[in-house]
Amino acid sequence: MQQLALDIGLAPVPTLDNFIDAGNEAAAEHVRLWALNPMRSPVPTLLWGESGCGKTHLLLAVAEAVRGQGGRVGWLDPQVINPAHFDERWDVVLLDDCHLYTASQQAAAFNWFINAQAPVHGRGRWVLASSALPPTDLVLREDLRTRLAWGHVFVLSALGDAERRAVLRREADARGVFLSDEVMDFMLKRFSRDLSSLMMLLHELDAYALRTQRAITIPLLKSMLENE
């Protein structure tokens, strides 16, 4: 059965607190400890894994945490067509989905990496990157690939169905709504299975149920999709 992508509403802002770390506890703890420590280690970190495992969530969450502390962030992903020059005021460099970088993006990422590692007040700045592949399989310029590989490397795994159901149930309970097994079956079979999409769907479904004063059922979900 073909799964449907969502294009409704806005997903909740990714934070360190709302990242579900089941199966990825070591990576999540490493990122949390770094992001919340003003004396950050300059050793870079690469997170890799399949789509939907939470890599981009963690990078965005780090950006939120650093900015919340008054810091500045350099961000690069495949949608940034013309990367900026390195800014000495950046406290951290975040490189998302680097396996998809063009030649010019790879050149910018390498430049950012080199500049970030140059000591400022006795220490370098942290580089956190993400990829769908491990360092040995990355088809990137060799000087960038080897630098992504020399620090901490964590593989992230996507949640299984049991974990997805547990997360959906917990979030529904926190919202004070009842989410039946039938509705969860429908959500998991008909929509993108990555957790961020499922949480976005639940958020929109809860809001629609409140507006229409109806319980969350499969007919309500279908009605929401027809009317939104």
Image (cartoon, helix red, strand yellow):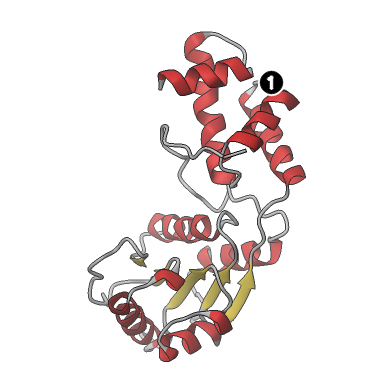
Q: 34 or 148, which is in the foreground?
A: 148
Residue 208 in the image: state x and y as whole percent.
49, 19
Q: What residue occupies the far top of the structure in this picture?
A: 213
What residue lies at 57% left-to-right and 54% top-to-bottom?
52
Is 138 placed above or below 228 here? Answer: below
Q: How many marks?
A: 1
In this rendering, would 29 be left or right of 125?
A: right
What residue lies at 58% left-to-right and 47% top-to-bottom?
194
Disc 1 residue type (three-letter): Phe
Residue 155 in the image: state x and y as whole percent.
64, 69
- Residue 151 visible (yes or no): no
What residue lies at 31% left-to-right and 84% top-to-bottom?
111
Is 160 placed above or below 153 here? Answer: above
- Residue 166 visible (yes or no): yes
In this rendering, would 137 be left or right of 225?
A: right
Q: What residue occupies the far right of the structure in this picture?
A: 162
The N terminus lies in which quarter of the figure?
A: top right
Q: 146 or 210, which is in the foreground?
A: 146
Residue 25 in the image: state x and y as whole percent.
70, 61
Q: 200 or 115, which is in the foreground?
A: 200
What residue lies at 54% left-to-right and 45% top-to-bottom?
196
10 Å neighbourhood of mark 1: few (<14), some, or many (≥20)?
Answer: some
Residue 7 in the image: state x and y as whole percent.
42, 36
Q: What kind of element bears circle 1?
A: loop
Residue at the disc numbered 1: 178
Q: 118 or 210, which is in the foreground?
A: 210
Is 172 placed above or below 30 here? Answer: above
The C terminus lies in which quarter of the figure?
A: top left
Q: Quadrant of residue 69?
A: bottom left
